[in-house]
Amino acid sequence: MARRTSSPFAARTGKPASPQRSTRAIDAIVIRRQQLVAELAMLRKEGGDPTFIENAQQLLTRWWAGANWAAREDILKSATWLVRMSQCRKS
C-alpha cells in the first residue's frame, strides 16, 4: 500500500503552509534592523559595554541570515534589549 507523504488536510484548505508577511511588515523589520546596527556603531564610538554590543551584533548578522521573519522579529527584540543594557551601563 502506498504511503502518504503529505497531510490529507493540506490540499483541502487551499492555504499556504505558513502565513506570508506583508511587504510593509518586512520593510518595518528591515528598517528596525538598520536602526539597531546604526545604534551599535554609535555605542561603540561612545564607549558602550562591549559585551552587549558584540552580542547584539552577532544576533543582527550571524543569526539573522538563517532566520525566518518570525525569528527575525524575536532577534530584534533581543538586540533592542542588549542595546538598552549597553546604554544603561554607559551612563
Image (tube, rainbow, N blue to C red):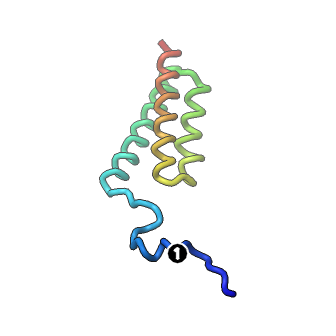
The residue that appears at 46% across and 61% down in the rendered structure is: 18
Residue at mark 1: 8
Q: Position of residue 3 (x, y in %)?
A: 66, 81
Q: Is residue 67 visible from the viewing direction of this image?
A: yes
Q: Quadrant of the N terminus?
A: bottom right
Q: Quadrant of residue 23?
A: bottom left
Residue drawn at (40%, 48%) of the image: 30
Determine which quarter of the picture holds residue 61: top right
Residue 16 in the image: above or below residue 26? below
- How many numbered circles are shown? 1
The x, y position of residue 60, in whole percent, is 52, 42
Please name the residue shown 48% across and 32% down the image: 40
Query: Is 15 left or right of 88, judged from the image as shown?
Result: left
- Residue closest to the far front: 1
Secondary element type, mark 1? loop
Q: Outermost residue toward the right?
A: 1
Extreme residue toward the top, this view: 91
The residue under the point 61% across, 26% down is 51
Instruction: Tell me residue 53's x, y (percent).
Output: 55, 29
* Residue lying farthest to the left in this orientation: 24
Q: Position of residue 89 (x, y in %)?
A: 53, 15
Residue 2 or 85: which is nearer the viewer?
A: 2
Q: State left or right for residue 73 relative to residue 25.
A: right
| Category of crowding for the residue at label 1, using alpha-carbon neighbours closer than 10 angstroms: few (below 14), some (14–19), many (at least 20) | few
Q: Nearer the viewer, residue 8 or 34?
A: 8
| Callout 1 amino acid | Pro
Nearer to me, 4 or 78: 4
Confirm whether residue 41 shows in the render.
no
